[in-house]
Image (cartoon, rainbow, N blue to C red):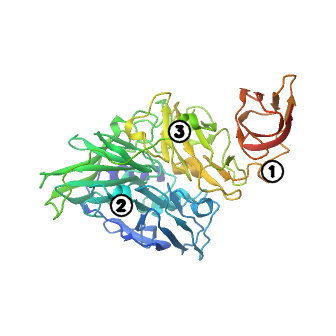
Amino acid sequence: MKKNYLLILSIFLFQTVYTQNALLIPDTINDTNINLALDYGTYEFFTGKVTNTMGANGNILGPTLILQQGDSINISVANQLSDTTTIHWHGMHVSAENDGGPHTVIPPATVWKPAFTVRDKAALYWYHPHLHEKTDLHVSKGIAGLIIVRDNEEAQLDLPRTYGVDDIPLVIQTKAFDADYQILAHSNSDSVVMVNATINPYVDLPAQVVRLRILNGSSQRVFNLGLSNNETFLQIASDGGLFSGPFETNRLQIAPGERAEILLNLNSRENDTVYLMSYASELPNGIYGATYPGTNTGMVLNAYNPNPMNGADFNILQINVKVSTTNPVTSIPTSLVSVNPIDESLANTTRTLTFSPETMGLDQLNGKFLINDASFDMDVINYTIPFENIEIWELTNRSAIAHPFHIHDVQFYILSRNGNVPPVNEQGRKDVVLVKAQETVRFITKFETFADDKVPYMYHCHMLPHEDAGMMGQFVVSSNPLSVESYNLNKPEVKIITTQNKGEIKIIAEEKISDIRIYNLQGKSVFPNIEYDINTALVKNLSPGISIVMLSINNQLVAKKVIIY
């Protein structure tokens, strides 16, 4: 009976014509010393209805942090909640101890004080809790904030950057509410769309070039953004920085955790009204937000249907064009900044990650999802990555639903989707990529600047219920890849034997081998010829002497010394 009531409420909330509300613009902190207080609050999403929330320095969301590349930042995060939490600086290149992952917890009534130099390029980043198994709850309740990084290269461009006037932050989310108008986590009944915690929002923008900085802060939903009149706009940036030039389009698909910056040309448009919309009817099946969340239309995802937002086009933000400002930006640069992807030939190694459901079949969408057949374990380091390694990560999705994959520490460049060159607006710096069902995505990145053998970084699906349920792994970046305490030397059982051929060894393991790396005694990677066959491998062209063979088997690292003849 309760489920039926919640279903009726969900449809009612979606269909209700709300009073229009002025878009909330979050406050800013523009300082090298930042104080954040995480606490409970209340918020009136619906007239006369009080909802319990969480926020940073307020009842919901948090202030936008405006940082300058090269500045040294000192942050104080005071946890005034009764629950332990963390704060992760999503997309930013900081040391593992400052990253705010699940291991760097902030207990109640304590203060965490990260400090770091801003090394990132001008772009939109964000911060949010990352406590294992409670990320979705804390984010859904309201703890999330934007980070705008500025740098000298971006400052030379004639772009809108007056915050809240012609440079507008947009945190787009969908939420589910129960019968008492309280926020639900881990729910597929997310039938209420909001921007900056504002339902049915409008914003007055000047008749000139305007910049929208967009975050998909939803727990699961993918948006397919476009304007109500189908006119084109210009995307100028993705997750980690500006493009080399504007990309003209009339649709922008953006998955949870992804960011984008777009320019609207509102010159001579005074008194016009246009809507930013999601054209979800155009999303292919197999994406959360499409008509069917799985590639097989017979698959069931609890409470997904009949959520009226799925597969339907809907308004996100009403834009009212008003008089221009005193010194408006009226033209759009034809070129932006230098973008220098990493050459694929420089890669030291390729890692293969496979996404799969824990249980196959038509009900697989309601279960857990795994990475390389394993669920997250706080005590298992999945990869130890040599400092300054350049790596290709190959992501293959064997499940029936798309997963937005996020990696901490680094920005990456997408090399291919199913062997094809990625679209232009996916060729910039990224830290989240949506891997569609039955798709393989390859990206390249470099693990530089920071090394820490003890504190790990994370990689995971950014659908928060999937992440909380264990679709996550962790890695350390090590300046000493030969430190044996990082590795399990006992199990699974591995035999390494020399063959009759010089410079050749054979590796035999009890279980599937997912990765092999070879180092000399100085810790330098060497690159022999390796032939894999499930749980065996033949390694050829090794130099005589002592080598370190490092294997990844069943989510565990195994290291062994071997004498090469």
- Mark seen at residue 65: none
Q: Is residue 159 left or right of residue 517?
A: left
The image quarter containing residue 86 is bottom right
Q: CA distance from mark 1 to mark 3?
A: 29 Å
- Quarter of the picture containing the C terminus is top right
Indicate the secondary structure of the residue bearing disc 1. Answer: helix
Q: CA distance from mark 3 to mark 2?
A: 32 Å
Residue highlighted by disc 3: 443
Residue that appears at 63% across and 45% down: 389
Name the spot of residue 322 as percent of width and height, x first: 15, 59
Q: CA distance from mark 1 to mark 2?
A: 48 Å
Residue highlighted by disc 1: 484
- As displayed, is residue 222 above or below residue 536? below
Residue that appears at 33% across and 61% down: 198
Residue highlighted by disc 2: 196
Name the spot of residue 71 as percent of width and height, x first: 47, 67
Q: Is residue 271 left or right of residue 132?
A: left
Closer to us: 306 or 398:
398
Name the spot of residue 359 as percent of width and height, x first: 63, 36
Residue that appears at 79% across and 45% down: 521
- As displayed, is residue 545 above or below residue 471? above
Q: The residue under label 3 is which amino acid type?
A: Phe
Q: Earlier in the sequence, mark 3 or mark 2?
A: 2
Q: The residue under label 1 is which amino acid type?
A: Val
Q: Earlier in the sequence, mark 1 or mark 2?
A: 2
Mark 1 surroundings: few (<14), some (14-19) or many (≥20) residues within 10 A:
few
Q: The residue under label 2 is which amino acid type?
A: Asn
Mark 3 surroundings: few (<14), some (14-19) or many (≥20) residues within 10 A:
many
Indicate the secondary structure of the residue bearing disc 2. Answer: loop
Name the spot of residue 80 as percent of width and height, x first: 54, 75
Closer to us: 414 or 461:
414
Mark 2 surroundings: few (<14), some (14-19) or many (≥20) residues within 10 A:
many
